[in-house]
Amino acid sequence: MRRTPLASAAGASPTSPRESLRPSPRRGVRILLPVAVAGAVVALTGCQTQSPIQTDTPYQAADGVPVDLGPVQIRDLVVVSDGKDKPGVLTGSLINTSDSEQRIAFAAPNSQPVYATAAAHSQSRLSDTSQLQMSSVPVAPGDVITLTVQSPSAPAAVVTVPVLPPAHYYQTVSPTVAPTTAPATATP
């Protein structure tokens, strides 16, 4: 009877030369694991090149659109209206960095312009003190309208502005009813 010491039975020493050429299952795992990890790192790093970081891309974090007219800037410009062919109110933030008062004109296609005034070195809301009201909005809420915005200190800007319903935080800028003339009554 031949006795084998415990160390050589538990160790990896082969008993024949043929067995020494065969890789052990543990050796394969030790080789494949680092290769798989390296492949995963390369694959996940490639995802970043196809998906840029959102905070590196400037965007307007508001419902409306920005308009730059030299020293006059308008931010979050929207039209609030109850429906198609009904009155609408312009709302947004108006900033004037110039030394003089600026008069800004807003005009929809085939309609008369409406005007807002911005004091020198000021910031205000278009609809805070009095509503800047359009007589008729040719599109329904949820659509967009093309407006021409102009100030004396810069060329006109043509912008596509969203039309929103007077709901939620726009309910306070709801358009007023257009004035009508009362019919004449006959006296007996």
Image (tube, grey):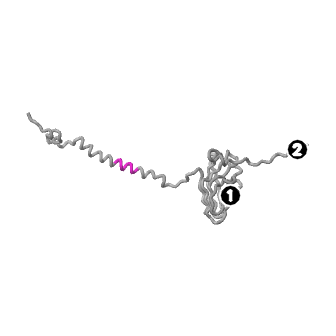
Q: Are marks 2 and 1 in contact (CB under 8 Å)?
A: no
Please state if 66 lies on the left or on the right of 42 as rendered.
Answer: right
Type of secondary structure dominating the magenta stretch: helix
Residue 70 screen position, x and y as percent: 61, 63
Dot 2 amino acid type: Ala
Q: Dot 2: within a 10 Å radius of its alpha carbon, few (fewer than 14), some, or many (20 or more) residues? A: few
- The residue at the point 76 percent across, 49 percent down is 179
Q: Earlier in the sequence, mark 2 or mark 1?
A: 1
Q: In the picture provided, is 170 more to the left or to the right than 56? A: right
Residue holding disc 2: 186
Tell me the residue at 68%/61% (across/down). 103
Please state the horizontal and vertical placement of residue 144, each as a whole percent of the image: 62, 49
Using residue 51 as the reference point, say whether residue 89 is left or right of it. Answer: right
* Residue at mark 2 to residue at mark 1: CA–CA distance: 41 Å
Which label was assigned to residue 116? 1
- Which quarter of the rendered picture does the C terminus lie within? top right
Q: Which residues are magenta?
A: 39-46
160 vs 188, nearest the viewer: 188
How many marks are shown on the rendered structure? Answer: 2
Q: Is residue 40 magenta?
A: yes
Label 1 amino acid?
Ala
